[in-house]
Amino acid sequence: MSLTTQFIAELIRAANEADKLTPFEIKRLLNRSVATIRDMRDQTGIPGSSRARDVVIDLQIAAARADALPADEVRDNLLDAADIIRTLKIILDGKP
């Protein structure tokens, strides 16, 4: 299992237990997600966006608000991150 696949699984597990995560754990997972997404976007050549609707911006805001996020928002953000990373992995796996 690749590191990316392991991280996706970690995000999904964490989302399933969002109510048990500490603000530090939430912040760490979201910040790792942001870094992973940026790195994978660079590898694929997919540019990020400076618009307010870029998932990376949403994840950064969620990380900054980790201590005040309700469990359902934590879950949604972690699942969004896992989905984007999984999609980018599929793109990278298909590149020659």
Image (tube, grey):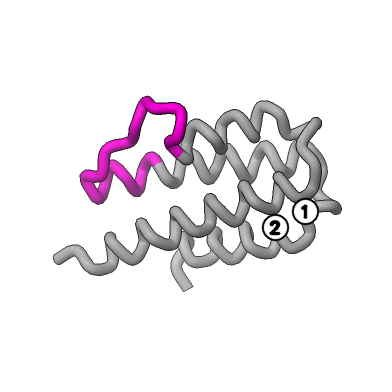
**Figure quadrant of residue 37:** top left
Query: Circle 1 sits on which residue?
Result: 18
Total label count? 2
- Judge from the rendering whether residue 47 lies leftward or rightward of residue 72; answer left or right: left
What residue occupies the far right of the structure in this picture?
Answer: 20
29 inside magenta stretch: no
Q: Is residue 85 above or below residue 60?
A: below
Residue 43 rendering spot, x and y as whole percentages: 26, 48
State yes or no: discs 1 and 2 in contact (Cβ < 8 Å): yes
Q: Which residue occupies 45% across, 34% down?
A: 53
Callout 1 secondary element: helix
Q: Is residue 53 above or below residue 4?
A: above
Q: Which residue occupies 34% across, 48% down?
A: 40
The kind of residue on which mark 2 rests is Ala
What residue range appears in magenta? 38-54
Q: Which residue occupies 38% across, 40% down?
A: 38
Report crowding for label 1: few under 14, some 14 to 19, many 20 or more residues within 10 A (C-alpha): many
